[in-house]
Amino acid sequence: MIFVSPLLFKLFFRKQNQAFAFYPFIFCRNHDLKVNTHIIRHEKIHHRQQLELLILPFYILYFLEFLFRYAYLKDFDKAYRAISFEKEAYQNDNNANYLKTRKLWSMWRKQ
């Protein structure tokens, strides 16, 4: 289910953030993003990752990996892009068949 919530993004996210997946929901910054196939597919990849890790551990690992990357890279955007979960989602959000062929734990496999 996809929701549009500009206030949520204004209060809790940076301007660069367009959407956020919290299984089973996807929250978008504006209505145009609800039909953006790349963004929705990106967030659905995160849904699959969340399910594999039973949701709460996903967020713990995501946050810890971000902290580690940020401490090492000293740059918010580079640290965010270096997170294994984001790498997988960005590398595959153009592939319409990706979720049909995706293997278990793909966020930690070499692509």
Image (cartoon, helix red, strand yellow):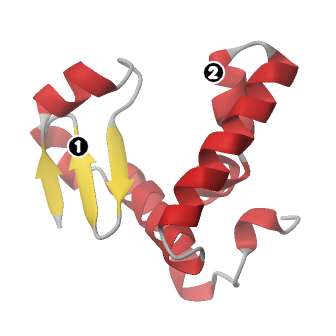
User: Residue drawn 62% across and 49% down?
Assistant: 62
Q: Is residue 8 above or below residue 65?
A: above
- Amino acid found under the numbered disc labelled 1: Cys
Indicate the quadrant where residue 80 lies. top right
Secondary structure under badge 2? Answer: helix
Among the 4 quarters of the image, the one containing residue 63: top right
- Residue at 12% from the left image edge and 38% from the top image edge: 5
Label 2, label 1: how far apart the Cα atoms are: 20 Å
What crowding class fits label 1: few (fewer than 14 Cα within 10 Å), some (14-19), or many (20 or more)? many
Q: Are marks 2 and 1 in contact (CB under 8 Å)?
A: no
| Disc sitting over residue 28 in the figure | 1
Secondary-structure class at tag 1:
strand
Which quadrant would the C terminus be assigned to in this image? bottom right
Q: Image height check: is 51 above or below 93?
A: below
Tell me: 63 left or right of 99.
Answer: right
Query: Observer-nearest residue: 92 or 60?
Result: 60
Residue 42, given in percent of the width and then of the height, sits at 47, 56
Pick whichever, 69 or 111, lies toward us: 69
Quarter of the picture containing the N terminus is bottom left
Query: What amino acid is found at the position of numbered circle 2 in the picture?
Result: Asp
For residue 32, above or below residue 50: above
- Residue occupying the far top of the picture: 74
**Residue at image mark 2:** 77
| Residue 48 badge | none
Mark nearer the N terminus (2 vs 1): 1
Relative image position of residue 84 (x, y in whole percent): 73, 51
Residue 76 seen: yes
Q: Nearer the viewer, residue 3 or 56?
A: 56
